[in-house]
Structure formats: C-alpha cells, structure tokens
Image (cartoon, coloured by chain):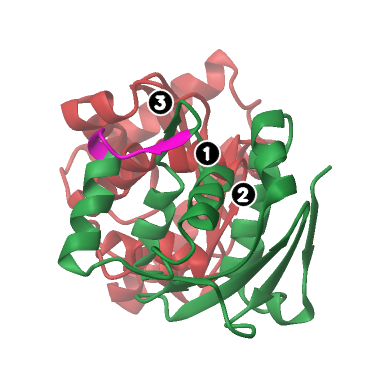
Amino acid sequence: MALEYGSDEWIQAYNDLVKERSAGGPPYIMGTPEWVAQYEKMIQEDAEYKEAAKTWEGSVVIHILPKPEIGLDKDIYMYMDLWHGDCNYVRIVPPEVGEAGDYVITGEYERWKAVMAKELDTVKGMMQGKLKLKGDLPSIVRSVKAAARLVDLSASTNPIFPDDLSPDKIEELRKFLHEASEKFGI
Amino acid sequence: MANISLAPSAEEVPMASMLAEMLRANLEGKPEKAKVFEKLKAKVYLFAQDAETGMTMEFDRGKLTVHGGQEGKPDISISTDSATLLELANIKIKMGMPWYFDQTGREVIRKLIKGELKIKGMFTHLGALTKVTKVMSVN
C-alpha cells in the first residue's frame, strides 16, 4: 500500500529516495525523482526566474504520457509549487494530485524530450496541439517570460533521455519506477 | 457569456480553439473589453509561421466565429512566430489604448520594424486593429 501523499512519512521517504539516487551526481534520467530535484534546485537558485515570476501564482504540472517501450509504463506528473517567484518544491506526484494542478501541460514523451532538447518551443507546441494546456491561458500569457525561463532551465539540466538507454538500463528504470509507484502512489 | 463559436474548420486547428478560449476568458467579467467586442466588426487572420498554422477570427458586433486557416478575404492579416502572437496578447492597455512604451510594446514595435512581425491592413483598418488588440490583450 502506498504512503499517503503529502504526509510527513511520504515527504521523508521521498526526500530519502532523492538523496540516495542523487549520490552519483548528474546527469540523471529525465522523469526520475533525482532529475526533478536537480531541476527544483536550478529554479530555486535562478535570479532571472525569480524576477520574471514575481507575480506568478499557482502550480504548474508537466504531464508526460506513458511510453512503455522505454520503461515509462505510467503517466508521470511533475508538480511545481510556484508562488511569487519562489519555487517551494518540484516533485513527482500521484496522478490525482497532478491532475488537480492549476496549470497542467500534457504531452507525449517525444514532445517533452524535444522541449528539453530545445528543439520544440512550448508555445509552438501548444499552437500545434503537440502539447495541451489545461488552465487559464491568459495567466500563462501574462507570465510568458517566467514560463519560458522554466523551459530554459529544464533544458539546462541536460538529462539522460530514457530512449537513449540500453535495454538493460530501460528494464532497470522500469523496475525502479514500478517500485516508486507502489511506494509513493506516483 | 461571450458569443464565440468554432466553425467546423477550426476543430482540427489547435491554435484556433486555444486562442478562442483565451478570448472567452478575456471577455468574461471584463465589461470594458465586452463593450469593445460589441462594436468590433472585422475579419482577422493570424498565422503562426513557425508552427505553420493559422486561423481566422470573424468579429461581427458581439459575435465571434473562429475558423481554421484563412477564411475569405481578411481585413487584417498578422503573420509572425507563435511566441510573438502571444506577446501581442500581452500588450498593456492604458487609457483605453494599446501601450507600446513598455518592454513588451517596444519589443513588438522592434519586430514590426525588422519584419519579424507582419501586419497587413494595419493602416487601412487601424481602428479595427486597435479594437482587436484591446479585446485580445490579457492585461
């Protein structure tokens, strides 16, 4: 049975997991808790984001659709708790928590990979329907510079993309994500 | 609730439904924008060059029909990249007029001068363009 999301036990266990898996240092695999934690740190330390997001209110969720052939058997929800330039946390969260975010941007793995490789502009992706936004678009437009900075920072993490992994490593990733799903409900 | 409808041709153009939703959100609860919307009669074509997708907004005094692609002969045609199209929606309105003297406004003017933003019908339909800018502005 999964731990209750947001409980002290959940947070402690999640943080322990991140610490343990971050030990080797970056680059990390895109979509894993340690990669998300690296991204969180970059946002928290970024003066440009802080300035651009001074009036931003609300959570932003990056929703990566499943792609079983590269180990991503389930949806991944990367939840960013953002408020007036501060980033309280970025975590992988259970689907029901992710879906309840203020702004949820959904796309297939390839689209997000292209965004993080700076091959796809997020706005262009939304105009083409490659990425779908759920949430108040005018608010995003008002903070378009902050949103662009978040995307730039995600690209700066230089992640390892799951589809570049060897078959053995893909199975390892699948096993890890399955265990994390059982323990954390993510 | 604003009278905004999607023509069948818009159903397959994500940009069209996205911007129609933005306009709806803009108009709701903002009587000053709704007033401008009630007076606006113009056909406006927006083309996102990088996304290779376009849409036509047919404003007809309080009613808007959104079409996918170019529909008929537009009064105003705006062609630029996706991000700049959204930047246009970020122009501030001051004293009832679009404000081009802050960073966003200056950037729009710069792109216009450099040809990165093309607006056909800008001078012949200046009044309509001003109204469209007011209605589309998220500010």
Q: Is residue A68 visible in this depiction of the protein?
A: yes
Q: Is residue A182 rendered to the left or right of residue A90?
A: right
Q: Is residue A123 rendered to the left or right of residue A104?
A: left
Which quarter of the figure is the N terminus of chain B placed in? top right
Q: Residue at x 38, y 43 (%)?
A: A144
Residue A76 is a magenta residue: no
Q: Determine the secondary structure under disc 2.
A: helix
**Residue for badge 1:** B138
Tell me the colour chain A is drawn in: red
Q: Position of residue A135 (x, y in %)?
A: 62, 42
Tag 1 and tag 3 share a subunit? no
Viewer-nearest residue: B137 or A27: B137
Q: Determine the secondary structure under disc 1.
A: loop
Q: Is residue A94 above or below residue B86?
A: above
Q: Residues within 10 Å of mark 2 (few under 14, many from 20)?
A: many
Q: Amino acid at mark 3?
A: Tyr
Chain containing the residue with disc 3: A
Check residue A2 in the rendering and tell me which mark sits there, or answer none.
Answer: none
User: Would you say the residues marked 2 and 1 are in contact, meaning their CB atoms lie under 8 Å apart?
Assistant: yes
